[in-house]
Image (tube, grey):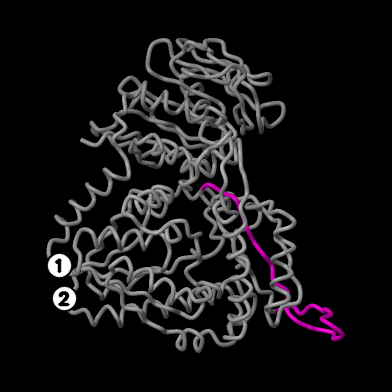
């Protein structure tokens, strides 16, 4: 039986990060809404309660019956989870005099507690809360404080329950991974048998049993998720897998040709479809971002469906769906910001059963599986790319000439990011290594490309704007482009990447000198929130 940690989600933006940290400990976990604890599941070895945007005193605050698991398996409360455990057991939680946000140092009251095994003195942690615990319940003891938070960590003296008001899952908590390891491995007893190798072996066997000799169709995008899913399925069922790669004309420069070559080298059976004429015709004159997305989504379904129907005996539709796509959202605000970047929603009349070999994996785990399968590194480390492609990186209507301009500028930018090497240490090095980037630590430093250091990068064409410029003795009146690069761990929040000035100067000069139609280069220094990663 596969052991698992259950993470109950109270709406925190870092809940998925908790899950990733647990998986990095070679331990399987599931993220479930706070009120969906799986009763009677003997594979559960521990429970973690996440943070939340709410106060425990809010009328709409999420609350759970702790008796479902307290006393049965070890429990760890984080931030709101720590406050709720105190509140539910008769402790006091009150509004802090000022919001406690940022770095703090732990002062241990009981460093011998199992939760702190291997911790350094004065360990740095990350706080982010508006309420604070002012009294812990009877039967609990304080085990750590900070200069501003008396009950930074506490534990039950009677049951296996621990609680921390800081966030061990974020990189700013220097020994946060050690804390989670102490809980998951030492306290909960994880056998640490969840790994890329074990996943490949288990999943290949499961796919053979699930699919048998049936034919399977998979839609490839060129991204890491669908590519890894294809190679995994190919390992399981070989020639019975048919992949379809649709070119809507708004991929990156030479991407359709290059990715098709990569897929052929991997031994995949791929049908490449150039449907750019249809997409450009249907997008003519359209400027609204949501309408662009809907047209591209509709056309993709039509093209894919037409190709899929040619494979008469297919019974399965495979998708590169990963775990974050399936985690049930608590939908705190109820507001839709925009449609999802990726195209989806294939028609029901296809009458195909769904096969999702990556449905339990986070993005970094997908990359590890890709390496286990022997895939080339440039495919595995590709940045996320929107399903509608460059159509949502062109402000205004879409034409072939605008796509050409953006492809040329973006190609210079992305190639430059891949070629420029940087040395990293400390938190930044730990973040990059945790994301699965292959690099060797030497004298406390790693060397990676700028491309590997950042989460996502792209170029935006401001085609609705014209900028005056001078080239030679001539006045120009052409378009500006904006470069975007962000660092992130899960894309839920992102900070703009602080790229070196010499790199930015070189890329700017090369774009202006080589790309006809561009005479100005800007750099986007907006973080998410309040901005999004994509412009449209």
Is residue 488 a member of the stretch shown in magenta?
yes
Residue bearing mark 1 = 214
- Label 1 crowding class (10 Å Cα cut-off): few <14, some 14-19, many 20+? some
Q: Nearer the viewer, residue 385 or 517?
A: 517
Magenta part mainly helix, strand or loop? Answer: strand
Q: Which residues are magenta?
A: 464-489
Q: Position of residue 149 (x, y in %)?
A: 64, 20
For mark 2, give the secondary structure. Answer: loop
The C terminus, quarter of image: bottom right
Q: Which mark is residue 417?
A: none
316 on left or right of 291: left
Q: Residue at x 26, y 43 (%)?
A: 198
Residue reaching furthest right? 473
- Label 2 crowding class (10 Å Cα cut-off): few <14, some 14-19, many 20+? few
Is residue 153 placed above or below 51 in the rendered structure? above
Q: Residue at x 61, y 33 (%)?
A: 128
Q: Residue at x 33, y 19 (%)?
A: 71
Q: Residue at x 62, y 49 (%)?
A: 422
Q: Quadrant of residue 275?
A: bottom left
Q: Position of residue 402 (x, y in %)?
A: 62, 82
């Amino acid at each position: 039986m596969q052991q698992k940690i259950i993470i109950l989600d109270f709406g925190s933006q870092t809940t998925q990060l908790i899950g990733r940290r647990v998986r990095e400990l070679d331990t399987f976990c599931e993220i479930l809404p706070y009120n969906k604890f799986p009763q009677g599941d003997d594979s559960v070895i521990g429970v973690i309660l996440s943070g939340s945007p709410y106060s425990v005193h809010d009328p709409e605050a999420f609350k759970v019956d702790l008796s479902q698991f307290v006393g049965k398996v070890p429990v760890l409360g984080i931030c709101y989870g720590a406050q709720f455990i105190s509140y539910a057991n008769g402790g006091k939680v009150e509004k802090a005099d000022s919001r406690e946000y940022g770095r703090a140092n732990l002062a241990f009251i009981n460093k011998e507690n199992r939760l702190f095994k291997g911790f350094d003195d004065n360990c740095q942690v990350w706080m982010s809360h508006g309420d604070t615990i002012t009294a812990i319940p009877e039967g609990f003891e304080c085990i750590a404080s900070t200069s501003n938070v008396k009950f930074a960590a506490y534990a039950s003296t009677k049951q296996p329950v621990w609680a921390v008001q800081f966030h061990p899952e974020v990189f700013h908590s220097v020994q946060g991974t050690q804390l989670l390891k102490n809980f998951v491995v030492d306290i909960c007893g994880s056998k640490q048998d969840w790994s890329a190798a074990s996943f490949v072996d288990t999943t290949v066997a499961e796919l053979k049993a699930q699919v048998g000799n049936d034919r399977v169709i998979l839609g490839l995008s060129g991204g890491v998720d669908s590519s890894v899913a294809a190679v995994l399925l190919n390992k399981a069922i070989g020639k019975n897998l048919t992949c379809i790669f649709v070119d809507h004309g708004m991929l990156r420069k030479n991407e359709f040709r290059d990715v098709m070559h990569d897929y052929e080298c991997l031994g995949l059976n791929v049908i490449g479809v150039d449907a750019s004429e249809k997409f450009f015709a249907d997008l003519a004159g359209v400027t609204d971002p949501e309408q662009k997305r809907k047209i591209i989504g509709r056309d993709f379904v039509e093209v894919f469906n037409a190709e899929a129907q040619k494979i008469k005996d297919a019974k399965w539709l495979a998708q590169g769906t990963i775990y974050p796509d399936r985690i049930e959202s608590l939908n705190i605000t109820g507001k839709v910001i925009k449609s999802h970047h990726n195209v989806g929603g294939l028609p029901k009349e296809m009458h195909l059963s769904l096969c999702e070999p990556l449905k339990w994996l986070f993005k970094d785990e997908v990359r590890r599986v890709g390496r286990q399968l022997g895939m080339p590194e440039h495919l595995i480390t590709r940045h996320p790319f929107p399903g509608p492609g460059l159509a949502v990186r062109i402000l205004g209507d879409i034409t072939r000439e605008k796509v050409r301009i953006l492809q040329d500028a973006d190609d210079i930018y992305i190639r430059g990011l891949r070629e420029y090497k940087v040395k990293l240490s400390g938190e930044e090095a730990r973040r990059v290594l945790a994301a699965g980037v292959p690099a060797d630590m030497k004298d406390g430093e790693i060397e990676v490309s700028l491309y590997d250091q950042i989460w996502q990068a792209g170029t935006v064409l401001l085609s609705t704007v014209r900028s005056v410029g001078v080239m030679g003795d001539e006045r120009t009146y052409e378009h500006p482009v904006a470069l975007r690069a962000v660092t992130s761990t899960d894309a839920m929040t992102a900070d703009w990447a602080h790229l070196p000035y010499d790199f930015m100067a070189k890329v700017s000069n090369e774009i202006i000198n080589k790309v006809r139609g561009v005479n100005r280069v800007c750099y986007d220094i907006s973080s998410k929130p309040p901005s999004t990663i994509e412009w449209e």
